[in-house]
Structures are given as C-alpha cells and as structure tokens.
Amino acid sequence: MLTSTKQFCIVLVCIFAFASCSKDNSIPENETQLKTADLVNTIAYTSIESDILTGVNKYRESKGLSKLARVDEVTFQADDHTVYMTNNEVVNHDNFNVRYSNLVTGVGAKAVAENVAFGYSSADAVVKAWIASDGHRVNIEGDYTHFGISVDKDKNGKNYFTNIFMRR
C-alpha cells in the first residue's frame, strides 16, 4: 500500500507530466509588423521526434484540420527547453514567456503553445497521452500552422519531450 506522501508525489508528477501552456500574441494581428524571416526546415529529427510530428499531423487530419509544417526555429526553442528539463530532472513550462517572445520577435509568431511530457518510451505513447489530456489536445487541435519537437533522455534513460506549436 502506498503511503499518503507517495500518493501525493505521484499526483504531482502526473500533474506536471500532463501540463500544457499556450499564449496568443496580445497585439492584434492586423497591427503587427509582418515578419519576413524565412521559415526553414533543415534539422535532422530522430526517429521518435519524426514519429511524434507524424502522429500529431495524422490526428489533426483525422479531425479535418490542416497539417502543421516543421520549422527549425520552433524546434530550437523546444530543444532548449527539453535540455533544461533533462538537466534539472523536472517537467514544467519554466520560461515559456521567453520561448514565446523569441518566436514572436524571431519569426513573427502570432500564437504559441507547448506540450511537455516525460517517461514515455515511444512516440505513439506520448501522442496518445497528449490527445487523452484536455489541455494538450486543445494545443494539438489549435489554430496553428507550424510546430517543432525535441526529445532527450536524462541520465536514467527517461525521455523528456517538448512539442511547441506556432501560428504565423
């Protein structure tokens, strides 16, 4: 039988593992300066990262939503956060406002959201978990045009995930 302390810790881990975060640009789109930065996709994704992006797009298509395009700058932001989580062995949205601001100023993002997770061993498992979670599913089904992903293992071999969505 689990002690109440262990149960409390398990609940906290579940809450943090299934947290999502999103933010729209506070400046109306018709008043923002259009960023002309080219959106490039040259990153070589790992197989699990590619499978996550494919799984998210398959789910979106099944709901009649447009596919999202992969963008390096979004993935760079995701990777910075995944490395932060892995190094600190935490799952959170710390400094989301920084990633949001970097995408707004760097590539003209109008809206940004992110899903994080840890511990899943496959792309299918993490995508299914995000779809089963209301907050994460809202981000996956959101009015976004681009996305990026980063997956990294901690020293114990646990996967950490950051999936960032962006509308431009």
Image (tube, helix red, strand yellow):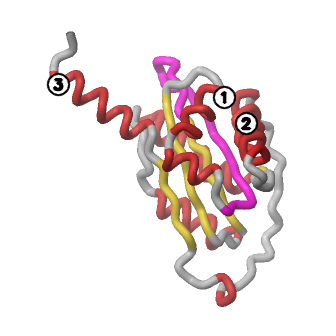
**Gap in angstroms between the C-alphas marked 2 and 3:** 36 Å
Label 1 sits on a secondary structure element that is helix
76 in relation to 133, above or below: below
- Report the residue that reaches farthest toward the bottom: 31
Within the magenta stretch, is there residue 147?
A: yes
Q: Quadrant location of the C terminus?
A: bottom right
- Where is mark 1, residue-wise? 123
Label 2 sits on a secondary structure element that is helix
- Comes first in the chain, label 2 or label 3: 3
**Gap in angstroms between the C-alphas marked 2 and 1:** 8 Å
Closest to the observer, 64 or 44: 64
* Disc 2 packing (10 Å; few <14; some 14–19; many ≥20): some
Closest to the observer, 37 or 134: 134
The kind of residue on which mark 2 rests is: Gly
Contact flag, marks 2 and 1 (Cβ < 8 Å)? yes
Which quadrant of the view contains residue 49? top right
- Comes first in the chain, label 1 or label 3: 3
The kind of residue on which mark 1 rests is: Ala
Q: Over which residues does the magenta segment extend?
A: 143-160
- Comes first in the chain, label 2 or label 1: 2
Q: Mark on residue 82?
A: none
**Image spot of residue 149 (x, y percent):** 66, 43
Q: Residue at x 35, y 32 (%)?
A: 13
**Image spot of residue 101 (x, y percent):** 55, 68
Which quadrant of the view contains residue 3? top left
**Image spot of residue 53 (x, y percent):** 73, 40
The kind of residue on which mark 3 rests is: Thr
Within the magenta stretch, is there residue 103?
A: no
Q: Residue at x 70, y 42 (%)?
A: 56
Q: Is residue 9 left or right of residue 130?
A: left
- Where is mark 2, residue-wise? 55
- Where is mark 3, residue-wise? 5
